[in-house]
Image (spheres, rainbow, N blue to C red):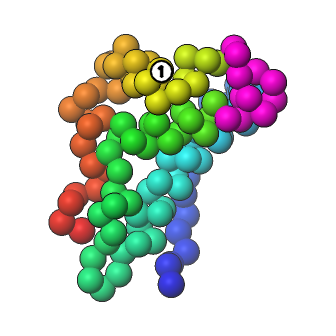
Amino acid sequence: MGHPSDIRIDVKGSLKGDDLSATVTHEGSHATDRMDFANSCGATGCSQSLNLTGRQSEQNAYGTEYRFWQSVGQGQQHSSIGSPDQINQFLNQHPDIYPRNTLDNLLFPSDL
């Protein structure tokens, strides 16, 4: 059984309404990815299938965020994150935010 953990997610104080909900949804997805891996760890190691790359975690987060936008009728306005290919294009267009040298690395050391 896993151990209780605290997760802290910082968001801009100026976010409100759907923008806040979308950000919490996105960042919460990252927290889930990390907790899934951490909770897989035991005496014999961790499940490496849950050790995602930064890119995989961003795919999950933006996919979850896009589904949120669809649920509030704003999917069309956020279509730039509407598919895995579009998300990859977005990530590649912003190397200042998503550097490839970290984006394509595993979130955790592979020897855990």
Q: Mark yes or no: residue 23 visible.
A: no
Locate residue 61, reporting x and y percent.
53, 39
Q: Mark yes or no: residue 7 visible.
A: yes
In the rendered image of this protein, does residue 8 appear above or below residue 96? below
Judged from the image, the secondary structure of the residue bearing numbered disc 1 is: helix
Give the magenta-colored segment's residue range.
Answer: 67-77
Q: Quadrant of residue 89?
A: top left
Locate residue 63, reporting x and y percent.
56, 35
Kindly identify which residue carries mark 1.
86
What's the residue type where badge 1 is placed?
Gln
Locate residue 43, reporting x and y percent.
30, 85
Residue at (26%, 37%) from the top-left corner? 104
Q: Quadrant of residue 4?
A: bottom right
Q: Quadrant of the C terminus?
A: bottom left
Marker count (numbered): 1
In the rendered image of this protein, does residue 19 appear above or below residue 37? above
**Prevailing secondary structure class for the magenta stretch in the rendered image:** helix
